[in-house]
Image (cartoon, rainbow, N blue to C red):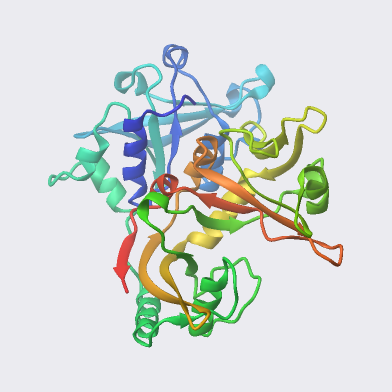
Amino acid sequence: MRKLTNKEISKVKELSNYSMPFTLIEPTQTALKKGIIDATAPVRRFFSEQNIHDYNLQNKGPDYKIIIKNTFILTNENKIKSKTSLYRPKTKKGDPRIWFSSMPKYADKNDIFAITYLDKCIYLFNITQLDIIKILNSNKSNPIKSLVNQFNENSNAISEELLSKLQAIVKKGPLKAIKVGDTAIGHAIESALEIEQNSSPKPDYKGIELKSYRAKRKSKESRKSLFAQVSNWKQSKFKSSAEILNNFGYQRGTDFKLYCTVSTKVFNSQGLSLKVDVENDLLIEYSEDKKINDFVVWPLKKLKTRLLEKHNETFWISAKSETIKGIEHFHLEKILYTKKPNPSLFQLLIEQGEITIDHLIKRGNDGKVKEKGPLFKISNKGFQILFPKPIEYKL
């Protein structure tokens, strides 16, 4: 798919505010003339994740074509009946194809369409041509606004309970750090909430994930950590964090470590970068050293699963740091409450360099290698796209 324009990114961001799961598709000029679109990996994953259709289970040839009649093309005024065709031809290795009847009437070449699914119906609309922001903020009812409002959920009792507990903690004064380093805030908050420390990948408080960070000036606002996830060693050339460290680590005082950020935008100082293998559904880390090249991989499906597991609901807690009698203390200042990130946008944000990974690998004095990551982190711009519009609470 082509790179989105700034206007299209703004529209995607607005749609994300409604917790609506969706994917994007681009009908080319050839596709519109032939009435056939390649079902790209993101589209196939969306259809599989929504339990609409699994191309891997579909046989090749016209006899096995599947037609979904409950399909609608939406405009700012109308809901047009359509049909979705899903099939794999006998030629070209059976590459998955998709088509929506009547689409050419509402599309120009290379327009971007959003596709979503609700109550066993497929809906699509042209985000390139339509003024999505105006449509969603209109005082009048319209098909697109009515659809996305169905995805927008209200706050629940658990979030209100957690908010009340945090407000009570703030009234007692600043929290005293019980550990040092980047995780000190999180440990202090969890201790105050009487949450048992553990390494579980599940959310911290009754399904709500707690993410805390030291407040900084807006001009220097840091990236936010999404989750930690090691690569798939079985599918990777390198089989351990130690092997990564041995190849790319550096000496710092008495430590041999690899602390660095890796993105799709550039090679970092260690010569490392990321890329997405769309067809094989993989995120790949590789070296500019051609002798090494690709060395670890993550299945994108696994990363999206981790995202949804961790951040179905999240309290992002900002705290001001203050040293009192030589010990760090934290003043909790505000909470950003987010719900249901859009996993279909996760890959896009990696490709655009808004989601990066941080290696935190070090060999200790005992000779053992420890990896605190890799941490998947997101920029503020990416945060606003991936997550629906947060609710902000002042503490």
Q: Is residue 193 visible?
A: no
Q: Which of 257 and 103 is in front in this view?
A: 257
Residue 214: x and y in percent read 46, 65
Q: Please report the residue visible at 41 percent of the width from the left and 45 percent of the height from the top.
A: 381
Q: Can residue 19 be seen in this view?
A: yes
| 304 shown above or below 75 | below
Left or right of 357 in this view: 352: left
Residue 82: x and y in percent read 35, 30
Residue 217: x and y in percent read 37, 56
Residue 191: x and y in percent read 53, 82
Q: Please report the residue visible at 61 percent of the width from the left and 35 percent of the height from the top.
A: 55
Q: Nearer the viewer, residue 292 or 324?
A: 324
| 305 shown above or below 270 | below
Which residue, as the protein is rendered here, is positioned at the far left? Answer: 139
Left or right of 252 in this view: 164: left
**How many numbered badges does the structure rendering display?**
0
Q: Which of 219 and 368 is in front in this view?
A: 219
Which residue, as the protein is rendered here, is positioned at the far bottom? Answer: 172
Q: Quadrant of residue 172?
A: bottom left
Image quadrant holding the C terminus, namely bottom left
Q: In which quarter of the image is residue 3?
A: top left
